[in-house]
Amino acid sequence: MADDSLVKLKVDGDVFEVDFNDLTLDEVGVVEDMTGKSVQDIDWNSARGMQGLLWIAMHRRNDRFTLEDAGRLKFSSIQDPEEKERPTGGARPRGKSGAATS
């Protein structure tokens, strides 16, 4: 059974993991301030939710990586680490059911 609290992200070929059970209060607070929502109400699949998630993952490796840096990432640089490489690159938008859309 997969651990639903663990999220894997692939950005420009580097794989990052974020365990929602391991988030710090500071990390959550920054994302809550950015989104204006409590952590329970954040849509992690939205642009701002994803920006927060990317910031957490990348800031843990490089403390100079800012929330603004995360916001400047191109959607095409983010991949699903479980998906095989596609020639066009980039993650495909997903519908509410989680299925990839074309």
Image (tube, helix red, strand yellow):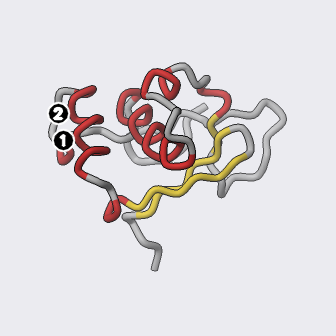
The residue closer to the viewer here, 23 or 7, is 23
In this rendering, position of residue 59 left or right of residue 14:
left
Residue drawn where x is 31% and y is 44% of the image? 27
For this orientation, the residue located farthest to the right is: 87
Residue 98 percent across, percent down from the top left? 45, 47
Residue drawn where x is 22% and y is 35% of the image? 32
Q: Secondary structure at mark 1?
A: helix
Disc 1: CA contacts within 10 A as few (<14), some (14-19) or many (>=20)? few
Identify the mark at residue 37; answer none if there is no mark: 2
Q: Secondary structure at mark 2?
A: loop
For this orientation, the residue located farthest to the front is: 64
Residue 50 percent across, percent down from the top left? 43, 36
Kindly report which numbered mark, 1 or 2, lies closer to the viewer in this rendering: 2
Q: Quadrant of the C terminus?
A: top right
Residue 93 percent across, percent down from the top left? 53, 33
- Say what amino acid the circle numbered 1 marks: Asp
Q: Disc 1 vs disc 2: Cβ atoms closer than 8 Å?
A: yes
Residue drawn where x is 18% and y is 27% of the image? 36
Gap in Å between the C-alphas at discs 1 and 2?
Answer: 6 Å
In this rendering, position of residue 30 left or right of residue 14:
left
On screen, 16 above or below 32? below
Q: Quadrant of the N terminus?
A: bottom left
Identify the mark at residue 41; answer none if there is no mark: 1
